Image (cartoon, rainbow, N blue to C red):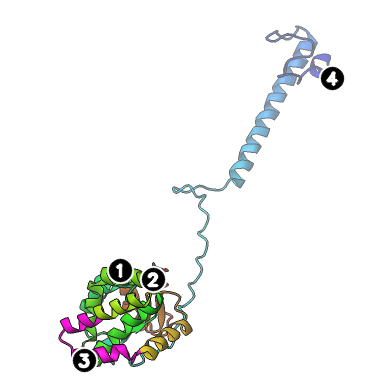
Amino acid sequence: MSEGSRGRGRKGGRPEGGQAGSSPEPGGGGSASLMGWIVSANVLALVALGVAVVALFFHPFVDENGDGGAPAAAQPTPTPAAVVEVSVDDDPSWGPEDAPVTIIEFSEFLCPYCQKFAQETLPQIKQTYEGKVRYVYRDFIIHGEPAMKISEAAECADDQEKFWEYHDNLWEQYDTLVAHYQTVSEQGETGMDALASTLKGYASDLGLDTATFDDCLDTGKHTAEVQKDSQDAGSYGVGGTPGFFINGQLVSGAQPFNIFQQVIDAALEGGESGSALPTVPSGAGG
């Protein structure tokens, strides 16, 4: 091999000992060097072509979304919602007893989210599913003795078949009841006496037999009933108010109407077993 050929390939392809841009020396050594450059150029071209082919073969294809065209990962199959056998007990309800969908709410009259449901969502359910839904109200006491006394008052109104009128009025008077709750926390029994007086006044306003109502409230006639509801709520897995069971599926918190609509519609279409009922997100609760 010629000396010119041995000098090829160092520092940018410059011949060893030469200068950038100089021409090959004339004579046999220059021809051999020139031929070496030509061969080298061809080899480099072939190598570059091979690298391009390999890169093209192994580079992932990119689709119009830029995700490489990889197949989408399989989505997990949702676990069917658990269905709980929940008793309606002997609590107040509206709607046909044989309605295809039963909604049981565990609620409390000092719960702000329960008020939101009662005044915004429940009327929509009643209007949209008239004749198809039975709604049952049960108690779940969170805020102690004042909440207990308010629920007992509603039960006393139920004795005179005025539960729903009393129920609606309690929600209208929510701010007053909350003020009483705060007074009880500051004044104890004096605050409880003031609350009882207010609850009796509501009964009078609705035209109930006040003597019967007052005796019912003063003797704690329905204390055990309210306590039983609260114990049942805990045994069914209700962690706060409001808590609902729609054909046995737990729906927690003050969900918007469209969430209730999804679950009710699924139940009407045959989702009583839970397999067709949608997954429900957790909502705000008290």
What amino acid does circle 1 point to?
Ala
Residue 222 x %, y %: 34, 90
Q: Residue at x 37, y 90 (%)?
A: 225
Gap between marks 1 and 4, in whole Å?
Answer: 106 Å
Q: Determine if the magenta segment contains residue 221.
A: yes
Q: Determine if the magenta segment contains residue 59.
A: no
**Which numbered disc, 2 or 4, marks the residue that appears first in the sequence?**
4
Gap between marks 3 and 2, in whole Å?
Answer: 28 Å
Q: Which residue is mark 3?
A: 211
Above or below, 111 relative to 38: below
Q: Residue at x 36, y 92 (%)?
A: 89
Q: Residue at x 76, y 9 (%)?
A: 18
Secondary structure state at the residue bearing disc 4: loop
Q: Which residues are magenta?
A: 199-222
Given residues 5 and 56, the one toward you in this image is: 56
Gap between marks 3 and 4, in whole Å?
Answer: 126 Å
Q: Which residue is mark 4?
A: 1
